[in-house]
Amino acid sequence: MLPPRVVLGTAYYPEYLPRDVPDRVAIDLDLMVAAGITAIRAGESVWSTWEPRDGVFDLDWIRPVLDGAAARGIGVVLGTPTYAVPPWLQRAHPEIAAERRTGEPVPWGVRQEVDYHQAAFQFHAERVVRRIVERHRDHPAVIGYQVDNEPGLLLPHNESTFQAFVARLRKEYGDVGTLNEAWGLTYWSHRLSDWSELWRPDGNSTPSYHLAWRRFQAERTTDFIGWQADLVRELRRPEQFVTTCLAYDRAAVADVPLSATLDVAAGNLYVHVQEGLQRPPRPSRFEPGWIGRGVADLYLAADRVYGSRGEPFLITETNATSIGGSHLNQPPYDGQLRQLAWAMVSRGARMVQYWHWHSIHHGAETFWGGILGHGLEPGRVYDEIAAIGAEFAEAGASVTDLRPDVDVAIVWSTESDWALQFQPPLAHPGGVPDKSSYRTIVTAFHTGVLDAGLRPGVVPVEHLGNDPAALLSRYPALVVPALYIASDAVLELLVGYAQAGGHLVIGPRTGYADPEARARAEVAPGRLRSAAGVHYLEYENLLDPQPVTGLDGHATRWAERLIVDDAEVLASFEHPGGGSRPVVTTKAFGDGRVTVVATVPDASLARAVYSRVGSPIWNGLPESVTALSAVNPAGERLWFVHNWSGSPVSACVADRRLELGPRDVRVVREERA
Amino acid sequence: MLPPRVVLGTAYYPEYLPRDVPDRVAIDLDLMVAAGITAIRAGESVWSTWEPRDGVFDLDWIRPVLDGAAARGIGVVLGTPTYAVPPWLQRAHPEIAAERRTGEPVPWGVRQEVDYHQAAFQFHAERVVRRIVERHRDHPAVIGYQVDNEPGLLLPHNESTFQAFVARLRKEYGDVGTLNEAWGLTYWSHRLSDWSELWRPDGNSTPSYHLAWRRFQAERTTDFIGWQADLVRELRRPEQFVTTCLAYDRAAVADVPLSATLDVAAGNLYVHVQEGLQRPPRPSRFEPGWIGRGVADLYLAADRVYGSRGEPFLITETNATSIGGSHLNQPPYDGQLRQLAWAMVSRGARMVQYWHWHSIHHGAETFWGGILGHGLEPGRVYDEIAAIGAEFAEAGASVTDLRPDVDVAIVWSTESDWALQFQPPLAHPGGVPDKSSYRTIVTAFHTGVLDAGLRPGVVPVEHLGNDPAALLSRYPALVVPALYIASDAVLELLVGYAQAGGHLVIGPRTGYADPEARARAEVAPGRLRSAAGVHYLEYENLLDPQPVTGLDGHATRWAERLIVDDAEVLASFEHPGGGSRPVVTTKAFGDGRVTVVATVPDASLARAVYSRVGSPIWNGLPESVTALSAVNPAGERLWFVHNWSGSPVSACVADRRLELGPRDVRVVREERA
Amino acid sequence: MLPPRVVLGTAYYPEYLPRDVPDRVAIDLDLMVAAGITAIRAGESVWSTWEPRDGVFDLDWIRPVLDGAAARGIGVVLGTPTYAVPPWLQRAHPEIAAERRTGEPVPWGVRQEVDYHQAAFQFHAERVVRRIVERHRDHPAVIGYQVDNEPGLLLPHNESTFQAFVARLRKEYGDVGTLNEAWGLTYWSHRLSDWSELWRPDGNSTPSYHLAWRRFQAERTTDFIGWQADLVRELRRPEQFVTTCLAYDRAAVADVPLSATLDVAAGNLYVHVQEGLQRPPRPSRFEPGWIGRGVADLYLAADRVYGSRGEPFLITETNATSIGGSHLNQPPYDGQLRQLAWAMVSRGARMVQYWHWHSIHHGAETFWGGILGHGLEPGRVYDEIAAIGAEFAEAGASVTDLRPDVDVAIVWSTESDWALQFQPPLAHPGGVPDKSSYRTIVTAFHTGVLDAGLRPGVVPVEHLGNDPAALLSRYPALVVPALYIASDAVLELLVGYAQAGGHLVIGPRTGYADPEARARAEVAPGRLRSAAGVHYLEYENLLDPQPVTGLDGHATRWAERLIVDDAEVLASFEHPGGGSRPVVTTKAFGDGRVTVVATVPDASLARAVYSRVGSPIWNGLPESVTALSAVNPAGERLWFVHNWSGSPVSACVADRRLELGPRDVRVVREERA
């Protein structure tokens, strides 16, 4: 459905321009053509324009855009506007407002204030979606659809949603006795005698309940997107695709099941640029959040989108320039947009779409910069994007539908993230819970792969499969950091993977809890113990980084007190309370190996661990350079070589000597793949 | 209406004393006379004493105070008690409680909990004000009235207030289509089809809405104060004045229109003393807030009161000793009260009134210190105030009704402050929005004037007038930092001012948005571009201060990426992403000059910029000394020379050599004005 | 009622174990016996197990535990389950949920969500308590009862509770005029004309109101515990004791009156271990809170439990290993559990009971570690507790019912803590109120006792008595830091104490307010002035520590501006605003002495002050060693010598040379007591 080249795109909202600005559609589309932009996203946020009053539709305002696009060979991804309900609907049906806490509806005035499963919303959403798609599906410009936008922002507490949760539990557990047992409700007198007694989530302190609630909410989001996708599929032309655009950090999103309802995975990928993209990295100046911090985060984010369906994907939004609120203004340095674009392509991106064409002159996102700024004149950002457009055009199909090469795959577990948000193992200084514990731990392990000169990948736990040999054929090494929520089956698969010849790296907290978020009543790491050759009864937070011996680097923030059964100790630290404590061990197991990293490694330690896991693929490259590879459908291996520093460097990759300028990127075809 | 000398005053609340303290009215008034205190404020916070039950009045409790004051020649400013409603009224009319958010009334128990426009409040407020004024207007002690007290604390969200907001919009915009366009409501599906669909402010994310809401709320405060002032004017003797006391940081205050309803402007001016008043200044140890931080802030605050009506004014409250909550205890160093008093007089203060006579023994402000402490014995603070009283008496009319000399005037825009509170351009470390962005930027520019040895002033944008020549005659140089909300007319006036010969200094963000808080759809700085000789398409936050070349100092926190059309570059910095960036430019324009400062200058850079704007008037003075001047009605120029350090210094001002002790101040008459 | 030896105990909840874990009661109890554990607490948190449905009881589930315990000579403290109401009761009687603010009930899902005085709760609580006690009182294993658990978490704002508060005030003050006067309600128009006009606590800003509200809430908790204790007493066998377990930091707890309703005082005592127990101490890495920070805090906490009734006591909960939330994981270093156990015994602990036997596999406290971890296998922690058990067994009666020797007693005032939470005198950097001001000040004075080599004690103000000579016979020196709320009688007692020969040390804020939380209308320190020989009119916060002369150390955070009447100045500092300021003075008074410390002393200054108060008892000991003593009922004096460092030391105590290992403790009987 997508053209045989990487699509350069942008969201385009001419309807937002102040009326006193002369019509610019032709000017804008011409500028896009000149920049090599081949697709636009349109129409997804203006329900009140599509349907200004209940049942009164104005479907043709978008025709000039569609016609202009078609005339220039620009494809249009038509959005459904369900993420921003019109004022008339809010007013007529106040009950559709999501309640953030029971009885506390989100006040109107932003967007995404809705509980998707309210009947009045569903009725109107279906109607407007049908009208829009029916009217425009046959327009030659329309290449696909985006349903809704960044769904899953809220965890609605509305009565009907809560009752659906109870019904869901009832279906799963059958009777309250089973639930009492599964969730451990004897504790603190929480045993239910009837389903009607289940407390609401507002005051919940039970981890099992929380995990069930998060799963339920993510299912609701998946159901909603799946329902819309089916609706659109009913109407679309067959060559048109259906997707959404996912913000992966949304509270109510499980990307794997959600993406399964789409034709292609699509993610929004924003990163802190400027010094944030420097390598070697320095500590970020920004709090963790939805904006990626550093080059490794960029690859992690892109690989998560790849991982959602295990195949090439769309980047539906990414930085053109400054992103976020009015107080965040970090336009990229020269060259960084090129670096980002090629980095995404290298992970399998079929589309790189900027949000958005021009900065908006009003509204919440006034200072989220577009390719054109408020002055609507092309400048430095436009020029750099045009250069990308030219490169994409030149590269053509050869860089399309890539499959990244992976030396070391990180296992991602959304459920573990949820569980550790509720019960974080790490603390900020002073003893404040660190709700980003999961991401912090995963990031430490993921970044280390790159630091060790290896090619990282991400595999969601849902896609591990159940065949150790198959898994081994995909990944020579597998890292499972903080896989707190793990079924017996998954743990056994991991053991089987090592036995079959894989190198399994086990990070902290892995396998500690069961799928009900209960700590397992067995000596940790339980089912992994004999393969690992270590066990532990105790664990602790490290207030200071502890230098290790045996390998370079430090143990930080967490240490399990390993007792070695039959593993080799690779690294230990001197405990402040006395005694030497192993924190990295390894054991040959079956045809493979199990390495345990019982701490959050700092960059040096992570690098040292991975230098035991694989031979660096870019040994000898300057520190500022990364070289990742991917294979295209023709079987050619392409190397993407980035110089993340502000100084020129030379690097030898795939037997080629490359001269890279400041913040440069080069794509090189390997002679013999 | 005021006596021909600066009034030294204090708020006096003998009614607060515990009943077991023997009557002190005579003792207190005698102590006041001995200290040169010539006026007191009384009665404004005790509605439940004036009217203990609905319709039952006790109006004569204050007679001993009035009689005692009259007997001693002390004037009384009688307060109306509307800012603190009595319990019986709260209980009978709970609907008068302001709602901080829709449906969330402020709980009773403090004061200023009321939505002024509730009918039950208005009825009772009018009745009690009439009774008090009618009863006491003829008392010879009464020289004036203070209506209400620090109005505008809250932004009431009550239903009737919200409906008044809708009605106000309806009147202004006529139909929703016009509003949709003016506010850009196509964005995120916010277009209204009917007035009844307007969302409430609770969830609002639209900047135009926010600005309209703030304007509306400030108008409500102005209406309320104007209504009370008119009520009192109906009853007062003609020689009595009517004022209020303004806290300038209140959320619902626009000082210029509000002060227009009064006979004289009046402000409450609190500053951090001790090391906070040192010069050269060091970074404040306190968060920004309603307490001024540093000498420059003191002048800024006083000049804002002057600016409210463009004429001499009252300081209705100021530090006697420690101010604020129980945890803030910073009594002034010896000499600092004198320094503050003369500083205020130098800016045109007609009254310096301390809050309050004695510390209170109970209630929220127990640790807000009085001239006398809880022990009710005169001490160091009393003695220093008595010294001020003696000096005021000696100076007499010569220091009364002064008009400050201004070398460089800062343009103040309350609307820009509101808009940048909602969309702050600056961030705190870590990426947290800095809601004080407007004040931070203005303060950087204002402080620099003093640092450069020039005489600063403040002119509210409402008082710029519309005649460039007239404006030039008032101010040789005009600084417009962060004038984000600016009409075309104001921008044209500024251009005209430069053309006519003024030196216009343009700070960051100036002219970026229109009066609807929309970013202008034109290349910045829009209408100022050709006069400035520069333009920009991009801007950014600076995470670190950047040293500039060309001038001393650093660019901090913000930089517009200036592209020079035909200006001279005065200062540039090396951008961390490469390249040299101009941040200060200047251009001769017409008979004047336009200087652009596209950053938040640090103290050195601001000083360096201003050294290009004017010749220092106190060149050669010790760093700890300021010398500001003002002209009295007799046309004499007085110099106010402060030594803000703890060491004695000599200084030569107005051809006089002065020996200044530690934390000293001297007033010198210039021989030939 | 307790056996003639220190009881080693643990809370035991086999009912929490997942059902798939094979029955462990026999295994667990055997392990306990092997560890010397002689008592367990059981059954207190599982009302929904005792009474799964309204009126349907299942009282025998605990029989295997009781029988197994009896068979092994383990005593059982049977808990009443009223702190965790079952879901059926929550649902049937939603009105029993405590309202944190008026109209905002605490959502269900944790425990302790109840307003104890709701009739529906009281009815059901009484019924279940009666059933449990009646069924099991005759079981030979049951040695006593714990009623409820850590009561007083919340300050319920429910209507009936608020009306009870009004009724309480009405009873105390008789008429509103008296209340208006007592609370100073003239201020800000708060005068009531009728009881019905009293504002609710939600918006209160009146300190007198706040103090009355806190007193009332604490009385409610005392009433509730007293009611339950009486109920159990009605039913128990005479040799069984009744207690509760107190968390001393609960908002609605006054430990002295509450403990008077019990047979024995019982407290939960948690401390930060690891480096937190090092001496010499370093600054804590954790925020202040319910977990003690440092060795001195440990003694302060234990002495507060002793102080509650002025006699030996139970420690009903203490760290076995990591405590608190999932993010706090600090298992003790080797030896620290022994150190803690003996430290508690040295202060009079009759029982040391660990919370809890095994870590729980689900629920809010999953990571609050037990003696056994989730793996349910004995390990390092179990082994160390078993060593303690062996030592307790060996020591037998000789270490039971100890009365600590006290050189310097700190006076504790819960009411002052409440008042200074509402009006904190100290600020955090930046000017943020420090709500821990009371504890901070008391801690500074208390820690200093230990640092000076003296034996500290704590005496609650309620137990000072009214006889100066008797008080002197108990304590040679008495320290009253931050005794902000003080009656005339107490102040006179303190003066009498010094006159009689005691050494009275007066800290900052002492005697400043009266029992209505009103600042006294007299020159501070009022009734203490002539005994102290100093007075002050001013006070201030110190932004930086100020080095003093005369004694070692610094004045920090606060200084009263002492004016010396007839005292000797021991220490002064140079004020940043000029001049030398006395901060420590002393005066011989009667047969004793009064020392004033008008600041928060740092560790050095506190030590220096106390070196003037008494001769060190452990002069010459290594810095890491403490030596405290107590006398047993046989009149023997025992010395408890701790080495709080990780290195071995020798120390000479009570004429014995002791070799102490790392983190060691030794108990030595003094030859001639």
Image (cartoon, coloured by chain):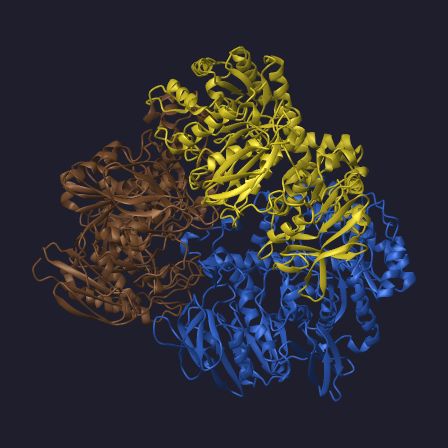
Chain colours: A blue, B yellow, C brown
Residue at the spot x=80%, y=78% of the render?
A: A398
Image position of C231 (left or right of B172): left
Image position of A58 (left or right of A250): right
Location of residue C139 by image quarter: bottom left
Image position of C166 (left or right of A267): left
Residue B147 location in percent, x, y? 57, 23
Q: Is residue A362 above or below residue C364?
A: above
Q: Is residue B498 above or below residue B146?
A: below
Image position of A565 (left or right of C233): right
Residue A392 location in percent, x, y? 81, 72
Which residue reaches farthest right? A71
Of residue A234 and residue A367, the one placed in the foreground of this image is A367
Please count the marks in the image.
0
Residue at the spot x=83%, y=56% of the render?
A: A377
Of residue A207 and residue A110, the one placed in the foreground of this image is A110
Q: Is residue C103 above or below residue C183?
A: below
Q: Which quarter of the figure is the C terminus of chain B placed in? A: top right
Residue at the spot x=49%, y=25% of the render?
A: B394
Q: Which quarter of the figure is the N terminus of chain B placed in? A: top right
Of residue C174 and residue C278, the one placed in the foreground of this image is C278
Visible residue check, residue C234: yes
Visible residue check, residue A113: no
Residue B327 location in percent, x, y? 42, 42
Residue C68 location in percent, x, y? 26, 63
